[in-house]
Amino acid sequence: MQRHSLYNKFMLLTALVLSAACSNSDPGTTEEEFSGTGQGVFVLCEGNFNSGNATLSYYNPETRQVENGVFQRANDRRLGDTGQSIQLHDGVAYVAMENSGIIWALDTATFRVRGQLTTGQTEHMINPRYIHFLSSEKAYVTDLYSPYITVFNPRTMGYVGSIPTGQAEAFGYNSTEQMVAWGDRVFTNCWSYSNKILVIDTRRDEVADEIVLSSWQPKSMVLDAMGKLWVITDGGYSTEEDSFSDNIPHLYRIDAETLTIELDQTLDTDEANVQLATNPAGTVLYVINNDVYRMDITASHLPVRPFIEAPRGSNGLRHYLYGIGVNPRNGEIYVADAVDYRQSGVVYRYAEDGQLLDQFRVGITPNSFAFK
Amino acid sequence: MDEVQVTAHRRLKDTGLQKTVLDTTVLHQHIALSMSDILTQHSTLFIKSYGRATESTAEFRGTSPSHTQVVWNGMKINSHMLGTVDFSTIPAYFIDQANLLHGASSLTLTGGGLGGAVEMQTRPLFGQGYALQYIQGIGSFGTYDQFLRFTYGNDRWSTSTRLVYSTSDNDFKYTNYDKKVDVRDAEGHIVRSYHPTERNRSGYFDDIHALQDVYYRDDRGNRFGGMLWYTHSLRGLPFLSVDYRDNLDFKNEHRQDALRSVLSWERRFGRWNTAVRGGYVWQDIAYDYSTTREAVSTDITHSRSRSHQGYVQADADWMPTDRWLLSGNLSAYYNHVRSADKSPFHIGDNYNLGRTEYNLSLSAKWRPTERLSLSAVLREECYKRGSLNGQRGKADFVPVIPALFAEYAVWKSEKRTVRSEKNSPLTSQLYLKASVARNYRYPTMDDLYFKPGGNPDLRPERGITYDGGLEGTLVHKSFSLKANLSAFDSYITDWILWTPNAKGYWQPSNLKKVHNYGTEMMLTADVRLPHRWGLSLTANYAFTPSINRSEDLDDNDASYGKQLVYVPRHSANLSGRLSWRNWTLRYQWTFYSERFTTTSNEVSYITGRLRPYYMNDISVEKQFQWRKVHASLKAAVNNLFGSEYVTVLSRPMPGRNFEIFVEIKPQWQGKKMKNEREK
């Protein structure tokens, strides 16, 4: 009997030994101290949709040093999913995280979170895209899905109200994208299934007018020194059997005062991630359409030859240019290369004359820049 | 004599195969397990899971989920759209035997399994009388699992009816390390910060599965079978751990209805085994992502797809002598898919198209000497799409797929019926195995026709695989040991990869070239000990480097020579089963090494790698055998140590959770049938 009991105990011990296996440890928690001195550049890296791997990089052009993942390192939390845009205002960086439904307000020196606006605080925000500051207490947020522009107070990060965009649903969508201001007007381009630019009266916070374009899906918009609105469309998409528009990007010049379309140029390439930027004086337009083109705002058409050719690999394949930013202090041009969208992207820094000054690795899919 | 012949025949059929067999003792452990759980715990396959009861796909040897071909009772069930199978929607209780065919071995079943193939079967229960089984499971997070099975089998007929109904709020709490809450004082200074505890509120599921099978056999070697499997699955899709939106404002739901049916006629006569099968699959999938706030509804994604598949197949095996086995197989599939969605990039039908697929396979297996067997397989596949834009599709022939297998018995004991003899001497077998194969996977219908993005110019993916290994068994009295060791080397070129284009939608191209190599090991030990103790152990280990050898996209591309994303280099698992009288203790340990999330394997990147995954599950079961009823009571603890983990970025998994199962098996007929069997 005694022997049986010992034997049984031994078998139980065997069972316990079997169960002794290691478990996953907790992730460490640390918050790094930063002092982002200098007139640095924030690079927002979009990450992969539904992966939550967007990051923020900080580059100092003087020292040519780059710090990657500064949001996570300073705040011990993730930036979120699909970083859409970054804007600086009154020494604070505002980052719209589209598929996380949050806008972060960050200290531009310590990168610490100062506040946040989440969809739950608002009535209609869904996927925030771009932010436009009207004053230190009033800002607009555009949205990929919501038929409203959200108004918030950037100082308190409190919700103020919503502006119905009032556009007829196109296939169930009504998106608003980038914003530029001219007097009491804010223009916003409607990208998803739309061919419109909305004109918002900022005194009354309502849509006052609209501009209808001949081409679909206006993607990017800037205002030049002459009060002209430059808009580039991606032309929708088109396949053999089925199409939504014709796939051909157009470049428009529109008078911000009279809302008349003064120039409509058809671009010759499709499938391009079209983006616009201007030099600090607003007298030169930069266009990404596979390569980077440079155009005087008084010119009547985009030059045929690119100003900066997208770098080409040894196999002749062109790098994917994904974003452009111009430093308002010195006119230096920053161009983002997404590589394969699944690894750290590369940023190229060019002088105003197109000479390559530096290049550095950032996060996944760099798409926008903000200059301190 | 008959017995020996059947055994010899089976071995010849399995010449050189790297095959893992999962039987009912593994598959029917408990009703809450899906095939994805079973494969995670009992094989070297890597299961990529987006959460509890959410999409889970299986990868052999560091390939992709679409390189795993899945066959149910002879019929391929991979999605025509995606090429994958979601193993989380297959209850393990519906499968009576699963064979995992690794690498080249998959070519004995089907083409296109560049990683391998999973063959799932239901089995008849002739002569076993009536049996009724009901299992009720109640678990954490509002989980209820119900299972009912009724079987009847006499000498001619066998029928089984199985029903599984699983429902769960799945509303588990987890510490969200991806978020941090700052508590501020009146001046706005941070007083303290903490990682919040959040809830997986939108991950509910409600799954119904029903399976009916009927078999009939006669005295002339005919067997007829019919199977019908219906699934209705409604699942909420959990929010990302980095989503700050209130999940109560959003509906993010995946709904799937599927009906799969197979009719079969098998006939054995003389030295022939023949079979004719036909089948039909209907599948309806809906995905809705929308929000309603302040009385304003907005659709974000609204996607629908409906597919029909018809299938016919004829097989013949002929053994002209004991040394030769010749087989032929011809099958045809017709798939029709209507896929439509509404997203910021597309509206209307993605495509509405039919495609016909023909497969022919011929094989010869030969045993020139008692110890050596050789086998050759040739396959041909042809695809032809329906009319598109008024243009008829042309027949597209995939190049001939050849495979060669060899097996050599280094050591073989002569006694085959050793298991039935109680005090037999030690017996052992050791086989050397090798194979080489070329394989092709034809692009899926989404790859070719999806709008926008689909690329009609895609070529089939090409693979070449070399396999070698050892398989040994050792049986001594009440102890048995089985070990399998294999090494493989495989190259896949023209690997189809979807990448985002500049407009924001994704497009496939024949981009990648991948070198997969490594080893797979399996060890099973069974021992019956005195005083009704029993111990069995199964261990699996795989080393699967899966290296990108594609040409660099450009000078900045650092992905050459790097491990593919989300593919672990090492995976291992260990299952232990200890029994004493009516008690059974099961222990399950699963391990995956770190996985990279970037193609360049950057370790400095904050989310660049997922930490190694260790999982421990335990269960204790007590069986009761009363005269009128057999019953069992089981308690299971999953994630015993409460590991906080993800297998995919930003997709939190549940912590420690519990489930209790009560099983009831009435025995009103059992005794009579048992007596009959004993006669």
Image (spheres, grey):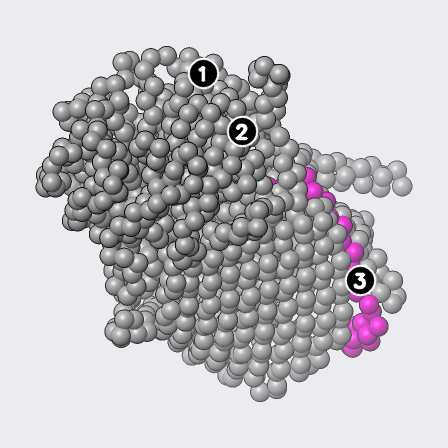
Q: Which residue is mark 3?
A: B664
Q: Within 10 angstroms of label 2, few (less than 14), some, or many (20 or more) residues?
A: some
Q: Within 10 angstroms of label 3, few (less than 14), some, or many (20 or more) residues?
A: some
* Image position of A243 (left or right of A75): left
Q: Relative to B17, does residue B75 appear above or below in the rendering? A: below
Residue B597 appears at what percent x and percent y?
42, 37
> Is residue B94 visible to the viewer in this orientation of the structure?
yes
**How far apart are the two marked residues, 1 and 3, measured between alpha carbons?**
64 Å
At x 62%, y 16%, the residue is B186
At x 82%, y 37%, the residue is A6
Q: Which residue is mark 2?
A: A158
Residue A353 appears at what percent x and percent y?
14, 24
Q: Nearer the viewer, mark 2 or mark 1?
A: 2
**How far apart are the two marked residues, 2 and 1, measured between alpha carbons?**
22 Å
At x 64%, y 63%, the residue is B208
> Which amino acid, by three-letter code, is at mark 2?
Gly
Q: Relative to B277, does residue B539 appear above or below in the rendering? A: above
Q: Relative to A281, does residue A82 appear above or below in the rendering? A: below
Q: Which residue is mark 1?
A: A110
Quadrant occupied by the C terminus of chain B: bottom right
Q: Nearer the viewer, mark 1 or mark 3?
A: 1
Nearer the observer, B372 or B565: B565
In this picture, which residue range is highlighted in magenta?
A: B653-679
Mark 3 element type:
strand
> Which amino acid, by three-letter code, is at mark 3?
Ile
> Which amino acid, by three-letter code, is at mark 1?
Thr
